[in-house]
Image (tube, rainbow, N blue to C red):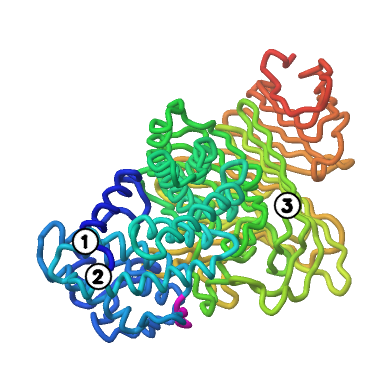
Amino acid sequence: MKLSRDRILQNHLRLQEAMGDEGQFCRLVDDREVADRAVEGVVTFRHLGLKYTQVGRKQIDWSGPQHNHQEWRAQLNRFFQLPALAAAWQQTARQQYAEAARDYIADWIRAHPARHDWALATYDNTLNLSIRMLHWFTVLPALVDSAAFDDETVDGMLESAQVQLDYLSEHLASRMNWRIAHADSLLTSGLWLDGLPGAARWQKLGVDVLNDAFHRQVLPDGAHMERNPSYHGWMTRVFQKYWRIARAMPELALAMQTEPIARMHDYAVGTTRPNGALNAMHDCRGRRTGMQPNQALEDRAAFRREAGLPDELPPTSQFFAQAGQALLRDGWGEDATYVTFDATPWGLAHCHFSRNAVQLHAGGRSLVVDPGSLTYEASDPFCAYGKSTRAHSTVNLNGWNQSEADPETRFDSVPGYDLVASRYEGGYWQNSFTWRFAPDHGRGLFAPHHRTLLWVRGRCIVVLDHIQHDYAEAPPFLEVNWQVCEGSVAADAEGAWARTCHEDANVLLLFPLKPAGTVLSVHEGESDPLRGWVPGETQYSPAPQVCQLLDPFPAGWANVATVLIPFQGSEVPEVTAEAGTRAGVSELVLRWGDGSSDEVFWTGCLFTAIGEREEFETDGSLVHLAKGPDGAVLKGLAVDATYVRPFAPEVRAAPETFAIAPQQAP
């Protein structure tokens, strides 16, 4: 043998001890159904649920003709069945599991023989290669003593691994999760195969690239550069693994530091809904109803204990400036209300064109939702739709997409209030996007969109939109879309409202301020063009999209206000809304059934001072006043103000955002 069985086991035990039980790709998977089906030559394909596909155990066509889907070819060549087969072998000692694992590996080697000029097949890629190596050598220590893994089989694996890892070392990605996955595979494989010719070189290259990626790809706020909850979680696990290895093997000179990884955990927790699922922002998915263990919270707490950090939760109002995402909640329990605002700078192909999009989760249910990742298969129209601006709860012109241009965003949080304001100036483009705009962006229209979100805790979420254009050919149409979760929706165009109709938790949407001629409509499960879809358990699922349409949209400004009111049960809150604009200042009044009210005053894009109103005077650009049934001001908020007379008459040294305390009210 090129590497003795004892050396293989020693290497594995040393690495396992360094990583602990949490090491990425270092645990076997106890899934007997996957193992039993794999024995029959049937492997899994995860896309809109789990699908089993017959491929056989020998003479497999590794190009994956069974599904016209890029992820099927990727999953087939990554060997996700191996950890389940190894676990079943360890638990039962039944040779059929070890023999099946051997057959899959041996057949892949048959189809891709090792030689000095080895190169990837057209259906393969270096990310598949990286994951394939990790899976092969995760299971080898568990299977190496089985009769199925004789000297010829193990030597064949090592010979193939040498040419694959040498190829990988010459074809490293320059960025994104691929670069980290490449380095992870090189370093971990080099440690597993320590003593094999080339292993020391893979180790050094892996360390150098991982150190570089850790400093460049982890943003100062803790988010990974792709700004995507799913891929961020993967990168967090990888870097935490090497944080552990660095402490156990200081001779490797790994540079993973504690504080950046702690911030990575904070971002992971922030992007998790109260039901324990990812918030489905960009290329990820998460359950919209039902509970699951909040793994992000558990992992964060475990890391902080291990690192000796204080055992405390992050603030409920989190803004990740480099990620461009406000992740807000009113508590850490399962019944918390959770609001997200997506002003993400372009994080490459795993980002969506969803600038200024909003999500709302309350009462255990996601109510205003992001479609997340529908499919990675570019030939499927749902790939482009899921990434499109129109699929998200934001503004578009002509149904076109935003561009890669980054928005400018601000965030303020004071007791009882959160405020996010973002200005996107990248225009809207006719072409669709899958992994890139092809062949180019197409026709475009410059139009800045400014959105302000004001969350009055315990009351409502107010969303203020200003969009402007000066068309050169023909006026576009304007859409303000609200994608809600599956289920029926009631809408009243004349009453200017819409609501979901679930039994447990709902949202009421009010549309009190909009340009003349705006029409309210609902789109669900439409195919030409695609509108109103989210991922389902086994297929794409129709879901209502509430749309405010202005067609045509004359040149100039559109001023739109939308109010989101989450509520429990099926009884709709008793509330009316009135709004209007006078002398450059807009006003919204919500009157509740108990006689109380909420009043919001603002100027376009928060650009100028409100000045003097009937009841107050301020140099701020937005003011909220909460009033009791008797009309007395109970509390309030001022944005970019030094005073609000008579409620906060003392002039501050500089404009700021502050709460108006009850004792300040006359």
Residue at x 73%, y 39% (from the top left corner): 588
Disc 3 designates what residue?
Answer: 407
Disc 3 crowd, CA 10 A, few/some/many (<14, 14-19, 20+): many
**Three-letter amino acid code at disc 2?**
Val
The three-letter code of the residue at mark 3 reads Pro
Instruction: Determine which quarter of the picture holds residue 651.
Output: top right
Q: Answer with left or right where residue 597 lies relative to residue 551.
A: left
Badge number at residue 501? none
Quick check: 382 left or right of 585? left
**Which residue is rendered at x = 74% and y = 48% of the image?**
408
The residue singled out by tag 2 in the image is 154
- Residue 5's tag is 1
Disc number lying in front (2 or 3): 2
Q: Report the front residue among 47 and 85.
A: 85
Determine the secondary structure under disc 3: loop
**Tags 2 and 3 in contact by the CB under 8 Å rule?**
no
Image position of 519 with respect to 606: above or below: below
Is any part of residue 312 visible from this angle? yes
Q: In terms of secondary structure, where does tag 1 sit?
A: helix
Q: Is the N terminus in the top left, top right, bottom left or bottom right quadrant?
A: bottom left
Residue 413 percent location from the top left of the image = 65, 31
Looking at the image, residue 313 lies above or below residue 538: above
